[in-house]
Image (cartoon, rainbow, N blue to C red):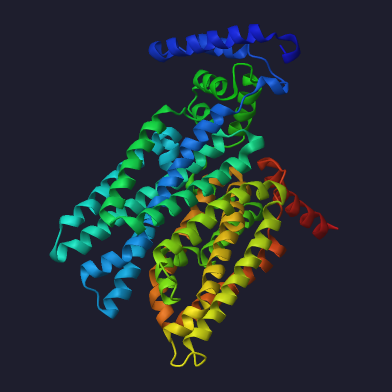
Amino acid sequence: MTWSGLKDIELQKLTTELEMSSAMSATSGDEQESTELYERLPSGKPTPHHTRIWPATYVCIVAACGFLLFGLSKGFNSPVLSELKSRTGYTSLHRTLDQDLFNFVYLFGTTLITPFSGYLSDRFGRKLSIILCCIPYTFGWLIVVLTVSTDGPAFRPLLYIGRFVVGVAAGWTTVCCNAYVAEASPSRYRGPFIAVNGLMLTVGLFLGQLIGVYVTYYWLANIILAHTVIFVVFAITIKETPRWLLTQGRKSEAAKTLVWLNGPNCNVGGEIQKIEDGISSLTKLSVSEIFQEFKKKSVYHPVILACLITFFLEFSGINAILFNIEDIFKEAQVKSPGLTSSFAVGGVQIIAAIFGILTTSLLGRRKLLIISYSVASLSHAVMGVYEYLNNEPYCHPPGDPQCKSDLYPLAIVCVALFIASFAAGISAASFILLVELVPRRVRGVGIGLSFLVNGILAALIAGIYQSYEILVKPYGVFWTFSLTCFICVLFVAIFVPETKGKTLEEIEHTFDNRRQQRHLVSIS
């Protein structure tokens, strides 16, 4: 049966029968009738009016709110560090070490859970994993809240434990929410829908920093805890992804979900056949088989590219700057550094992230990365010059506050420009490329490995930022980031292929074809 031979009212009746049969089979355990109904669904390409977009938009936005929670957790750092310093009675040395440790334990938690997040998402399903990741979020923020009534030597250990547990939850959230959006979004909207994850992270970061200007860390932690509860309530309302259901052999539930996502007149048969073809082409590999796959250049080449993309993502300096933005502005003698950092970082990021959703489809991933890293390199270089002029003999005496105050708008512009380039291009294009480059047969391991590299570098850079700044001075830090961004421009221009407008299968064949072409050249 084809779409041209099927009237809307007939398909509506058929899908209604399928929904009723799915409900009955869920209680009886017999899927035979649902399978027979599924086989009567049409195949072929539907006309445009046969699909709808709002249900997929709803579930993807709900899943993307996990990134909003992640952003709130990251934004918790910068606004409250000053209050925590005064609470714990920092000396100059303790200030540096404790601030680095506070940043490190959070990112170490995200890194620790990363290798297991993919397995947990496959084991429990995308929806249930999203709900379960809120358990460590809840416990972590409760521990942070309890520190407000804790005095003496127990204060800092409790604070670090709570921050570490929140980091574990954040790392789990990024993997399962990203997988959900990638599988639930229609293929033609996959890029923009995944880019919404970055937008929600940006909104969360902005809100965390902005709220932290006006409330204590105790109330900020309570606000984030309340958001966690609200997120769970909405997560319960979304559907499991059709792809995961089909991997579990639950075909009737997958068909029902596709009907709900795309409308009663969607091409259920064709969509399920496409997903099943993709699943059937993937065999579950043993550890030894995975090692064998990684010996193939068509596999390890894109995985190395993905890992290097995350390497340069972190060495752009994003986490070091975000976690220490208030201190950076205080050093630059910016007036109201807390409020300024909220708008210079959060406000600019939101606008830039919205722009990035559009540019990933218009410019392509490769061109967008080249432009964004070029802007980031320039902004870091100018910021380094600004810090040099304010800390070397050009100020008499060095570090004179009046000298810095005359130039502080330049610091705001440089930081805002870097944040804009990161949100509009570096972040959006990098995370889309991570999903698109890694071959399907090792995608779980490959993406997990790249996220592991990302987490280790994020924890390392944020954890040593204060100490590195003492060693090379503030201008040395920014010039280091400028150099790595410039190197990344060359790396992307030479090694990273364009993936815009290509299916995941076509991208994978790109690396296979390169290997075949080199083999033919060597034979000739």
Where's residue 438, x and y in %? 60, 49
Where's residue 188, x and y in %? 67, 36
Q: Is residue 295 visible?
A: no
Q: Left or right? Give the position of 144 relative to 168.
A: left
Report which quarter residue 238 is drawn in.
top left
Q: Is residue 295 above or below residue 126?
A: below
Count of number-bearing discs: 0
Q: Is residue 73 above or below residue 12?
A: below
Q: Which of the image's four quarters has the C terminus? A: bottom right
**Residue at (55% x, 33% y) in the render:** 57
Q: Is residue 398 above or below residue 483?
A: below
Q: Farthest right residue?
A: 524
Residue closer to the observer: 31 or 499: 499
Q: Is residue 436 visible?
A: yes
Report which quarter residue 2 is drawn in.
top right
**Residue at (72% x, 43% y) in the render:** 501
Q: Left or right? Give the position of 496 relative to 335.
A: right
Residue closer to the observer: 461 or 94: 94
**Residue at (53% x, 50% y) in the render:** 447
Where's residue 430, x and y in %? 59, 55
Q: Which of the image's four quarters has the N terminus? A: top right
Where's residue 344, x and y in %? 50, 62
Q: Is residue 63 above or below residue 146?
A: above
**Residue at (40% x, 37% y) in the render:** 129
Q: Left or right? Give the position of 380 relative to 84.
A: right
Residue closer to the observer: 34 or 424: 424
